[in-house]
Amino acid sequence: MIIINIKDGESIDRALKRFKKKYEKTGVLRELRSRQAYEKKSVARRLEVKHAVYIQGMNLES
């Protein structure tokens, strides 16, 4: 559970912004989306290797 302490005189908008930032850092939404669209380990590994090759290609161009 995420807890945000609201300081004296702090606006709700500011507190909501801090909550959203803290919520994003936990990765709850990212994990939820990954669980909704299950990806086999072999497919995930293939994509990871493909991405690594792309990044290496970008580094070699410079």
Image (cartoon, rainbow, N blue to C red):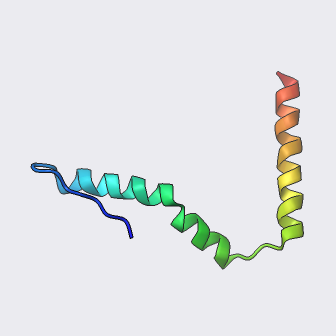
Residue 60: percent from left, percent from top: 88, 26
> Quick one: quadrant of the N terminus?
bottom left
Point out residue 12 in the picture as x, y percentages from the top left corner: 19, 57
Q: Classify 62 as above or below 12.
A: above
Quarter of the image for residue 6 reads: bottom left
Q: Which residue corresponds to the image point at 70% horizontal and 76% vertical from the top-left? A: 37
53 with respect to 5 (left or right): right
Instruction: Give how far across and how far down residue 11 sits, in percent.
Output: 16, 52
Q: Examine the rendered structure and indicate whether residue 17 appears above or below residue 30.
A: above
Residue drawn at x 86%, y 35% is 56
Residue lying at the far left in this picture: please name it: 9
Residue 55: x %, y % from top left: 82, 38
- Number of residue marks: 0
Q: Could you tell whether 41 is left or right of 19 in the image?
A: right
Q: Is 16 positioned to the left or the right of 21 in the image?
A: left
Q: Quadrant of the C terminus?
A: top right
